[in-house]
Amino acid sequence: MAAARPPKTPMKAGRLPVGLFAAQCEECFKWRLISTQEEYEDIRSKMIEEPFTCHRKTETSCNDPPDIDYDTTRTWGIDKPNIPKTPEGFTRRLVLRKNFSKFDAYYVTPTGKTVRSSTEMLAFVEANPQYKDIPLSSFSFAVPKVMEETVPESILKEGLNSSSVKRYKKTKNESAHTD
């Protein structure tokens, strides 16, 4: 499962919203774009029990070319499987930090309030008893892992953080020597 930032374009904003959602077929390993965030969350929430395959997407099979290639034309984040689907009325937002170091996850409540942690969600539910039946376990602040090999070189030069850059350069050099 992946969340990807749209193709690289210069941006001055401090945070970059996720623009695309994709799932990788367990049989052919091709990436398929998922039409909506809700559909993506449904697939992701059951990934271990019901792995994604091409046939789950209408009129698609493993014989078709991939919808999207895993490459450096965009920055990729790989989500953990089985993160719960966002409760109805709430919206889960993933945003890539300007320095590409990590994603941030937060929820927008039905009242429009932005919640950034489990503690804030507990406070929101306590202040809004109409949502008391929604288990707090329905909200996950786990974030996708930024796939450093897809981070723009210009960002790496500016520096994610020194250990990330060293690890990235070491991995890149090792792969260059093994090809």
Image (cartoon, rainbow, N blue to C red):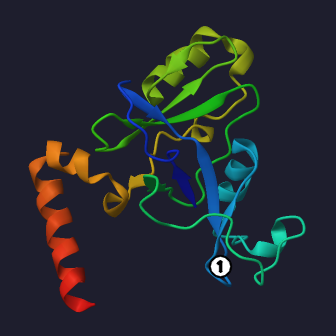
Crowd around label 1: few <14 · some 14–19 · many ≥20 (10 Å): few
Q: Is residue 146 left or right of residue 20?
A: left
For the point 56% across and 27% down, which residue is it? Answer: 107
In which quarter of the view is residue 172 placed? Answer: bottom left
Residue 167: percent from the left, percent from the top?
16, 64
Q: Is residue 74 left or right of residue 37?
A: left
Q: How many marks?
A: 1
> Looking at the figure, which quarter contains the N terminus?
bottom right
Q: Is residue 34 left or right of residue 176?
A: right
Most extreme residue toward the bottom, as rendered? 178
For the point 24% across and 81% down, which residue is it? Answer: 175
For the point 66% across and 55% down, which residue is it? Answer: 45
Most extreme residue toward the right, as rendered? 59
Query: Foreground residue, 179 or 124?
Result: 179
Residue 33: percent from the left, percent from the top?
69, 58
* Residue under pointer 1: 26
For the point 54% across and 51% down, which residue is it? Answer: 3
Can you say whether 39 is above or below 58 in the image? Answer: above
In which quarter of the view is residue 142 placed? Answer: top left
Residue 18: percent from the left, percent from the top?
53, 40
Residue 104: percent from the left, percent from the top?
41, 36
> Looking at the figure, which quarter contains the C terminus?
bottom left
Query: Foreground residue, 86 or 179?
Result: 179
Can you say whether 172 is above or below 164 in the image? Answer: below
Q: Amino acid at mark 1?
A: Glu
In which quarter of the view is residue 36 placed? Answer: top right
Q: Secondary structure at mark 1?
A: loop
